[in-house]
Image (cartoon, grey):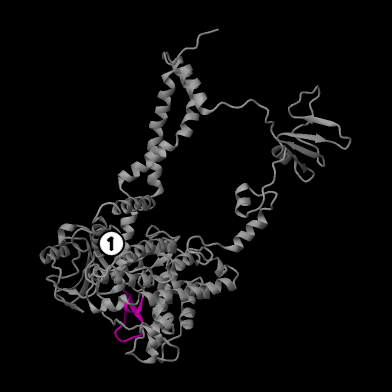
């Protein structure tokens, strides 16, 4: 509920702005602050007429990540969905002027309804409980059914590789959290059980669900839905700050996670399971199968049992990393509440539970002959069926060298010639396929050769159908070619410093293209490369300079803890994820210039042949214009 304001705003400036831009909201305003929405401060506005509105603003102060706390993205998706059948609040206005209340904000309508913290919805009748879950499932399906391009949101996120990007982000976070040491005992938090196995499993293309490219809410669950005050249906969806374009399975697995954990041994033993979701326990609570039928009845696709198990496993893997983050905060004594300590001890059970679901999905893969459990490896997962398919496509006699090496098959000895039949080839195919050939007819008399001169030319480029064509390998008796170094020396002797000038001119031309190529390649990938290089260099320095590692760990934790006090564990670590993702993905301009310079220097093997090829023509042209350039070769 809304209460006293903890983060003050300039009410006079806010009212002046509203009077000018949103006149339907009548001033003066009564303002209170909600207890939730710690990432983006959220306020309840009540107008002079009694109407209620909600204001969400960006937090004050310096933020480590540009991609986090994007209230403009929240406003944008709520506005875009207003034309669909997805229940969202009405968005009134977005203000990006910091001078009004200090940071950007937007105003939306207030949804007067019911919010249920317990997903079992215990305080309603069995009939309403069934209808409310059905409404929640169908609301999610309607949201996923909206195509981003139809509401002007095609650029809201990348439609492909959603899970691979998630895997990369969470792996970066988990490695940092695992290395965190207890400030008193010095003991490291450590890896999540089966962490390497899970990274290998999730990174295996054969196990992954196919890309869908739909809207994704990011935290779709019962307590982020507002239900009608008396009727059993959803009137609005809250908490849009994690919304993007990705895979719908992530939202569905999040919503159905109470079903996945209800009967799991590790969840039950740690008290993490909601036993109301055990089939037959609570009257009116639908089964998971029924929920999936409702979902598939609205969308245009159907998830297989294997995909559902995969999605549940990834959700639990993600949850285990969230709990590991809480354990890291407890180890550094930066999360002193008893609730945080209770969550911290769940890291190992959550890891085991996630791996159990991975194995369940793995068995589905094995049943479908997609993957064998023996081939799952944390560093390089292999798909034996793909290898067998390649073996069938490439016979031993025609495989490229690298494939023969991969399959450990003996290389064939190079042959000087090979015989082909041309009876099934068209004349044009024969001309294109055999540029050097010798044709023999049935009497074994020579009909002609391409390189021989005869009084009466034969159709040497078009052998008659049915004849045998003997391909001859090019002769190796020619004089050896000069090296680039020798050719460059000879060219320099002939044209002097002109050669150097042309080479430097080419260098000046290709560097801007290298820089543009690096920019086109993407700051996210360049930033990741920078992150890897700096991490390795920094690790070397830490082993030499005393106290440097402790300083780095303090700074990293300050970065990870930006965003406030632990209230909702999942929300807190989600904010950390966004910050680490933004920190890793933003490469400095100096890094991009340095990489462009390295690429530019590595292209010398292209610039030298081009210099050798164009120098004579450039010198000839310039001399024609009257320039006295290059060393003039004396006439014989």
Whole-percent x, y for residue 201 in the image: 49, 67
Question: Would residue 304 be visible to someone looking at this image?
Answer: no
Q: Is residue 329 above or below residue 432?
A: below
Outermost residue, right side: 443
Decide: is 508 above or below 68.
above
Q: Residue 25, image x and y in percent? A: 18, 70
Picture quadrant where residue 516 is located:
top left
The local crowd at label 1, few if under 14, some if 14 to 19, many if 20 or more residues have their Cα within 10 Å, is some
- Asked whether 410 falls inside the magenta stretch, the response is no
Query: Which range is magenta?
Result: 221-238
Q: Residue furthest left?
A: 12
Q: Secondary structure at mark 1?
A: loop
Q: Is residue 390 visible?
A: yes
Relative height, residue 595 to residue 169 (above, below): above
> Closer to the camera, 609 or 521?
609
What is the quadrant of residue 332 in the picture? bottom left
């Amino acid at each position: 509920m809304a209460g006293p304001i903890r983060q003050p705003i300039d009410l006079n400036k806010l009212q002046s702005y509203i009077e000018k831009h949103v006149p339907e909201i009548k001033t003066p305003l009564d303002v209170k602050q909600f207890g939730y929405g710690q990432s983006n401060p959220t306020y309840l506005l009540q107008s002079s007429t009694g109407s209620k509105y909600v204001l969400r603003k960006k937090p004050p102060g310096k933020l480590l990540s540009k991609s986090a706390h994007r209230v403009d993205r929240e406003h944008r998706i709520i506005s875009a969905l207003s034309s669909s059948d997805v229940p969202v609040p009405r968005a009134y206005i977005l203000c990006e002027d910091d001078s009004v209340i200090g940071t950007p904000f937007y105003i939306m309508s207030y949804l007067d309804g019911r919010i249920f913290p317990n997903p079992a919805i215990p305080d309603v009748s069995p009939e309403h409980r069934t209808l409310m879950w059905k409404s929640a499932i169908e609301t999610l399906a309607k949201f996923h059914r909206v195509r981003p391009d139809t509401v002007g949101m095609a650029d809201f996120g990348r439609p492909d590789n959603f899970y691979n990007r998630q895997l990369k982000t969470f792996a970066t976070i988990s490695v940092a959290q695992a290395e965190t040491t207890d400030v008193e005992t010095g003991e490291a938090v450590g890896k999540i059980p089966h962490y390497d196995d899970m990274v290998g499993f999730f990174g295996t293309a054969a196990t992954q669900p196919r890309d869908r490219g739909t809207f994704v809410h990011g935290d779709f669950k019962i307590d982020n839905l507002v239900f009608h005050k008396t009727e059993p249906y959803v009137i609005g969806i809250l908490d849009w700050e994690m919304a993007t374009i990705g895979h719908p399975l992530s939202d569905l697995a999040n919503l159905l996670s109470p079903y996945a954990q209800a009967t799991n041994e590790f969840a039950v033993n740690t008290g993490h399971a909601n036993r109301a979701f055990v089939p037959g326990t609570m009257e009116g609570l639908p089964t998971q199968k029924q929920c999936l039928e409702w979902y598939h009845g609205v969308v245009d696709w159907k998830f297989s049992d294997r995909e559902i198990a995969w999605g549940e496993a990834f959700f639990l893997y993600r949850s285990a990393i969230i709990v590991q983050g809480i354990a890291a905060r407890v180890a550094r004594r930066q999360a002193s509440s008893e609730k945080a300590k209770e969550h911290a001890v769940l890291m190992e059970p959550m890891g085991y539970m996630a791996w159990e679901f991975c194995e369940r999905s793995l068995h589905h893969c094995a049943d479908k002959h997609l993957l064998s459990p023996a081939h799952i490896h944390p560093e390089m997962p292999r798909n034996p069926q793909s290898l067998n398919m390649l073996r069938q496509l490439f016979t031993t006699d025609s495989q490229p060298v690298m494939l023969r090496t991969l399959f450990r098959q003996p290389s064939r000895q190079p042959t000087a010639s090979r015989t082909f039949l041309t009876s099934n080839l068209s004349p044009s195919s024969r001309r294109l396929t055999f540029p050097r050939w010798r044709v023999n007819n049935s009497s074994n008399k020579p009909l002609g050769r391409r390189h021989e001169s005869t009084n009466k030319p034969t159709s040497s480029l078009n052998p008659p159908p049915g004849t045998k064509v003997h391909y001859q390998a090019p002769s190796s008796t020619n004089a050896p070619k000069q090296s680039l170094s020798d050719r460059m020396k000879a060219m320099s002797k002939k044209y002097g410093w002109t050669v150097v000038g042309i080479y430097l001119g080419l260098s000046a031309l290709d560097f801007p293209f290298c820089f543009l190529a690096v920019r086109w390649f993407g700051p996210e990938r360049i930033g990741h490369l920078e992150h890897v290089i700096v991490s390795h260099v920094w690790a070397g320095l830490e082993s030499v300079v005393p106290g440097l590692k402790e300083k780095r760990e303090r700074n990293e934790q300050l970065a990870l803890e930006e965003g406030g006090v632990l209230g909702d564990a999942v929300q807190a670590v989600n904010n950390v994820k966004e910050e680490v993702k933004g920190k890793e993905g933003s490469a400095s301009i100096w890094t991009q210039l340095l990489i462009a310079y390295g690429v530019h220097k590595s292209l010398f093997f292209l610039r030298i042949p081009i210099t050798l090829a164009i120098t004579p023509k450039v010198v000839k042209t310039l001399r024609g214009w009257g320039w006295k350039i290059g060393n003039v070769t004396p006439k014989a």
